[in-house]
Image: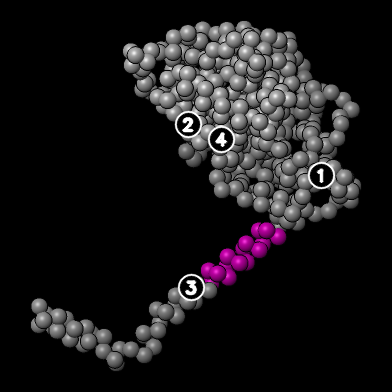
Amino acid sequence: MGKSSSFCYQISQHRFSTSFGGPFFFLPLSLAISTFLLIFLYICCTTSKVFTSTENNLYQESSPISSLIQQMIPFSLENTAEELFFSPRSAPLSKGNQWSMGNLFGLYGNYVNNTEVYHDRDIFLEDYKEMNRSLKIYVYPHSRDDPFANVLLPVDYDPKGHYASELYLKKVLSKSHFITKNPSEADLFFMPFSIVEMRHDPRIGPEGMQDFIKDYIYNISHKYPYWNRTDGADHFYVACHSIGRFAMDKVFEAKFNVIQVVCSSSYFVAGYIPHKDASMPQIWPRQGDPPNFASLKRKQLAFFAGTINSPARLALLKAWGNDTDIFANFGRLRTPDADHLLGSKFCLHVKGFEVNTARVADAIYYGCVPVILANHYDLPFGDVLNWESFSIVVHYMDIPVLKNILQRISLEEYSLLQSNTLKVRKHFQWNDPPIDYDAFYMTMYELWLRRSSVRVRLSASME
């Protein structure tokens, strides 16, 4: 071994003798340093150019609007650029080539068929029948003389307002064929507390909600054996107000196990897990049939109405507040919303305090193609519906070129988008009693997809 090592050492000394040193020894090092400096200079130059351009586009002062902004914005703008321009989950659309009709309508790339409203219609219809036949849900029972009956029992009136979806689901579910009185055959267990009612109950309120739910779970886990089998993984609750996302914060296992059916479905928020939780649409209920669209002439390119309560809406105001094609109103409208929804080709849903509002369902109801400006929004019924076939999803970064994006959509392409919008309208309506494929049945289907594939049976003694 000693001779071998000595021989190898002598060979290496011979191969790289001192005569070979000098400038050749430093050549690789100098090349590496030069390459590093060139890359560093390139990154600095291009980054500076991108952010300078973005800043000039979004924050250039326009005299009629600047004074209005000072009066209407209820938040600090110091850190708004971070929310607008940085997205860890989705890259912004490029103004040059990422946004194209080819990508939108599946002419190339990995798109299978972006003109169909369902990802796979045949599979959906087959699974829907099985769900309708087999899904069973056990609701924890509560009496009418319970001191919190207003929180735990379904309402006996037709829900209205921004958070009606939560109350409608609970009301319609309680009378549906999905309910079972036999917990041993249940796929899922429903905890029927209402986030909306808790929020307005002076005995609980937003401050006491987490303690109420902590006590509720403690009670059902000690009174019934069902929670303890899975630590709540086959349990669900419903919340349309954004405060519902934090309802489980004082019950650690519930926060990560329980299925949340929520309207505020943002995958950028730690408390929401898309493959576990389900997104439910926020719908403002309307009575009667929707208007006839056959004779409508939509002269306005795009419409938005709302308050300035987010950086995205501020950017929209700065870019398009004085535009004639994009009507962006941030005060009280002088005419009904319906007139603008019926008279516009595109209706903008722009993130406010949360990613969700009723504007998406409003647009669909009135046959106006929705434009989604809400980064990280896990869109409702996304397991089933192909949103690219009936809506336009735009990143915050592309607000300055929003008009160009919409104007590049041809009449033929717009007709297809609007036709598909009308096709999905039935999925965004509440009915009592429910109608096949409406918002209730679609939410049940989302729950059916999230049920456990292996049902944990109770022992005979526990049953």
Could you give the CA–CA distance between mark 2 and mark 3, rounded to whole angstroms?
Answer: 50 Å
Is-magenta flag for residue 383?
no
Q: Which mark is residue 250?
A: 4
Is 405 drawn above or below residue 421 in the view shown? below
Q: What are the residue bounds of the magenta stretch? A: 38-52
In percent of the image, x 21 and y 87: which residue is there?
Answer: 14
Q: Is residue 172 above or below residue 450?
A: above
Three-letter amino acid code at the position of disc 2: Asn
* Element type where label 2 sits in the image: helix
- Label 2, on which residue? 257
Rendering coords of residue 59 (x, y %): 77, 53
- Number of residues whose C-alpha sits closer than 10 Å to that of mark 1, classed few (under 14), some (14–19) or many (20 or more): some
Q: Callout 4: few (<14), some (14-19), or many (20+) C-alpha neighbours within 10 Å? A: some
Quadrant containing the N terminus is bottom left
Label 2 vs label 1, nearer the camera: 2
Q: Is residue 49 inside the magenta stretch?
A: yes
Q: Nearer the viewer, residue 27 or 330?
A: 330
Q: Nearer the viewer, mark 1 or mark 4?
A: 4
Cβ atoms at labels 2 and 1 below 8 Å apart: no
Q: Position of residue 421 (x, y in %)?
A: 64, 23
Q: Amino acid at mark 4?
A: Lys
Cα separation, mark 4 vs mark 3, equals 53 Å
Report the side of 15 relative to 429 (left or right). left
Residue type, numbered disc 1: Ile
Sequence-earlier tag: 2 or 4: 4
Question: Callout 4: helix, strand or loop?
Answer: loop
Please report the residue visible at 40 percent of the width from the left and 24 percent of the height from the top: 229
Give the mark, 2 or 1, whose residue is nearer the N terminus: 1
Q: Using the rendered view, name the quadrant where residue 382 is placed.
A: top right
Give the residue pinned by disc 1.
73
Evaluate whether residue 93 shows in this view.
yes
